[in-house]
């Protein structure tokens, strides 16, 4: 990785890139975080992992979430933030963004209906940023929560993938199976192509 991600501009300008659920209420609340039995789509956590933006589609989604989470931004301020993110030297993207591509993305994002939340992953377990739990402790919690529902699904696998990546651990099928107390075959059966690509992306950027 030639450049680490530089969040200084976003933080200095108070640009929101992470948000907890706003209307969905947790079923269980702990010192370390919250549990949503049916999951929530309202948790946005951009730039949580070390993985960089590698595709046009992903870049557009990230900028759309920035636009959605920051209604106080006017068009000029949003474009300034977007230019910062697409600058390869700032560590967010892995590819060069031409002026025409940038303008196309800005136009597409500006036409989006902000009354409709951007597509997001379902989350069942949300840990606080400073919960002081080790990755092993987090995975045990995720395994127990998922075990209650007796369902190993994409959301459960994704939760484990994120926690492993946060700890700079390589994501493997065996580690996922051990964390969720299931067979490797179960992990294989429930991993979509999208999750497989995400797994490879996270592992490639450790």
Image (cartoon, helix red, strand yellow):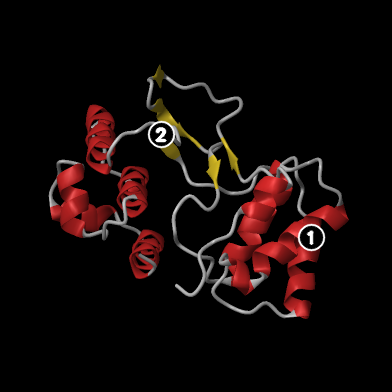
> Where does residue 198 sit, x and y in percent of width and height?
40, 62
Query: Going 55% across and 33% down the picture, which residue do you hit?
Result: 20
Say which of 137 and 191 sits in front: 137
Q: Considering the image in quadrants, where does the C terminus appear?
A: bottom left
Query: Going 27% across and 56% down the picture, which residue do you hit?
Result: 169
Q: Considering the image in quadrants, where does the N terminus appear?
A: bottom left
Query: Going 62% across and 57% down the picture, which residue do you hit?
Result: 62
Q: Give the number of callouts.
A: 2
| Precedes in sequence: disc 2 or disc 1 | 1
Q: Is 148 situated left or right of 2 in this image?
A: left
Say which of 34 and 157 sits in front: 34
Say which of 2 and 54 sits in front: 2
Label 2 vs label 1: CA separation?
Answer: 31 Å
Occupied quadrant, residue 144: top left
Residue under numbered circle 1: 80
The answer to whether marks 2 and 1 mark residues whose Cβ atoms lie closer than 8 Å is no
Query: Please, is residue 147 above or below residue 68 in the view?
Result: above
> Where does residue 77 sit, x and y in percent of width and height?
83, 54
Q: Which mark is residue 127?
A: 2
> Where does residue 24 sit, x and y in percent of width and height?
55, 25
- Residues packed near mark 2 inside 10 Å, few (<14), some (14 to 19) or many (20 plus): some
Q: Secondary structure at mark 1?
A: helix
> Where does residue 121 sit, x and y in percent of width and height?
48, 46
Occupied quadrant, residue 135: top left
- Residues packed near mark 1 inside 10 Å, few (<14), some (14 to 19) or many (20 plus): few
Q: Is 197 situated left or right of 81 in this image?
A: left
Query: Please, is residue 202 above or below residue 175 in the view?
Result: below
């Amino acid at each position: 990785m030639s450049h680490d991600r530089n969040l200084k501009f976003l933080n200095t300008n108070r640009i929101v890139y992470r948000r907890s659920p706003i209307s969905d209420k947790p079923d269980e609340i702990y010192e370390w975080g919250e549990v949503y039995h049916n999951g929530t789509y309202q948790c946005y956590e951009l730039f949580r992992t070390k993985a960089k933006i590698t595709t046009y589609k992903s870049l557009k989604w990230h900028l759309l979430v920035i636009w959605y989470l920051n209604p106080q931004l006017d068009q000029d301020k949003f474009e300034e933030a977007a230019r910062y993110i697409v600058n390869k030297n700032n560590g967010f993207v892995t590819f060069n963004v031409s002026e025409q591509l940038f303008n196309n993305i800005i136009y597409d994002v500006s036409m989006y209906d902000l009354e409709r939340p951007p597509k997001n992953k379902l989350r069942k377990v949300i840990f606080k940023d400073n919960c002081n739990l080790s990755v092993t402790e987090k995975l045990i919690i995720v395994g127990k929560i998922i075990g209650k529902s007796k369902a190993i699904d994409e959301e459960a696998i994704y939760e484990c993938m994120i926690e492993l990546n946060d700890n700079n651990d390589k994501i493997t099928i065996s580690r996922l199976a051990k964390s969720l107390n299931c067979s490797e075959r179960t992990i294989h059966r429930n991993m979509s192509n999208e999750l497989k690509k995400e797994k490879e992306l996270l592992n490639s950027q450790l």
